[in-house]
Image (spheres, helix red, strand yellow):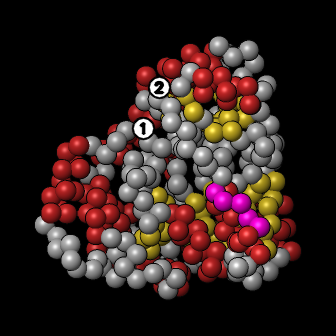
Amino acid sequence: MRRAVRDIPAYPFTPIDVPIKLDQNENPADFPAELKARAAEKLLALPWNRYPDLHAETLRAAVARYEGWAEAGVVVTPGSNVLIKLLTELAGIGQTVVTSDPTFSVYTLEAQMLGAELVQVPLCDDFSLDVPATQAALDAHTPGLLYVTQPHAPTAHSDSPQAVRALVQYADARGWVTVIDEAYYQYAGRDYRDLVRECPNALSLRTFSKAWGLAGVRAGYLLASPQLAAQVQKLVSAFNLNFLTQAVLETALEHPEYMERSVREAVAERERVLAALSTHPTCQALPSQTNFFLLRTPDAEGAYRHLLARGIVVRRQDKLRGLQGCLRVAIGTPPENDALIAAVRELR
């Protein structure tokens, strides 16, 4: 057994059963019942004794139509976390993985388990990318994999398009494979497909887990040039996506209006919650461009336990660089958000 695997802790999450679950940035709205029925019709019409598409070709075509992208530039897997692992295999092993600090933990876990050199560049005090420092890190290390997360997790911050463009173009010109992780892009109202089209070494990483409300289905995809996608596809196991999942996703892509409605509702609720907490005497609800926000408290452990006692589970982030006292809180349904606001107002 490799030491790199033995020495890395497991993914840091422990499920807690409470009435209000705001700890995993999930969409609180379930897939609509009428669409579930349509997906079930697709499933019943399929022969379950046959293998699915070799590389999810039917679904890739549906994603390509929805995104206005070349089908040959789409790669689909059971979750974007699977793609993070494959991208680390593609460009990280024996090379370098550069990301921010703090960052999404799966980037660092995969880099460490696969033996890549991990370089983390601290964010600025306002959570923005330190573009000059990141460019210096790219110059100082063997080209490999760069993560540019927009909007950023776990801070919920979006950088200016000018900063993102400057960094991605800089990396692209120097041979780095740049992953623009856009898991939450719908909530920010902007995306970077045009930048990916301009930069042959860049790709957009996307998921069905957040805005689409299909976290339980497990599917993610990337958009890239056909040349880069072909190299990633080599690392994807044959028949990696079952046709049960494929039928649900095809149904979703045929009816994106439900997702768009869900995003509008989440953004409105996000702004309502942030406004309601803006005058709190000791806690600060930080700005957000995602379906979650950071709540900075004087005592993260005390605040976490206080919320838990009221049936609300959130995610502690206070051990991460620059996030002292912070809890990560997902936007829930209006009644759940009302309960959260009331519970936070009790904190002193």
Reading the image, the residue beneath label 2 is 336
Q: Mark 2 and mark 1 in contact (Cβ < 8 Å)?
A: yes
- What amino acid is at disc 1? Pro
**217 relative to 141 in the view: left or right:** left
57 within the magenta span: no
**216 relative to 80 in the view: left or right:** left
Q: Residue at x 74, y 45 (%)?
A: 127
**Residue numbers of the magenta segment:** 7-11
Q: Quadrant of residue 91?
A: bottom right
Q: Is residue 132 above or below residue 241?
A: above
Q: Is residue 325 above or below residue 170?
A: above
10 within the magenta span: yes
Q: Secondary structure at mark 2?
A: helix
Q: Closer to the camera, 308 or 223?
A: 308
Q: Secondary structure at mark 1?
A: loop
Q: Residue at x 48, y 68 (%)?
A: 222
Location of residue 345 in the rendering, given as x and y in whole percent from the top left corner: 63, 15
Q: Residue at x 50, y 25 (%)?
A: 337
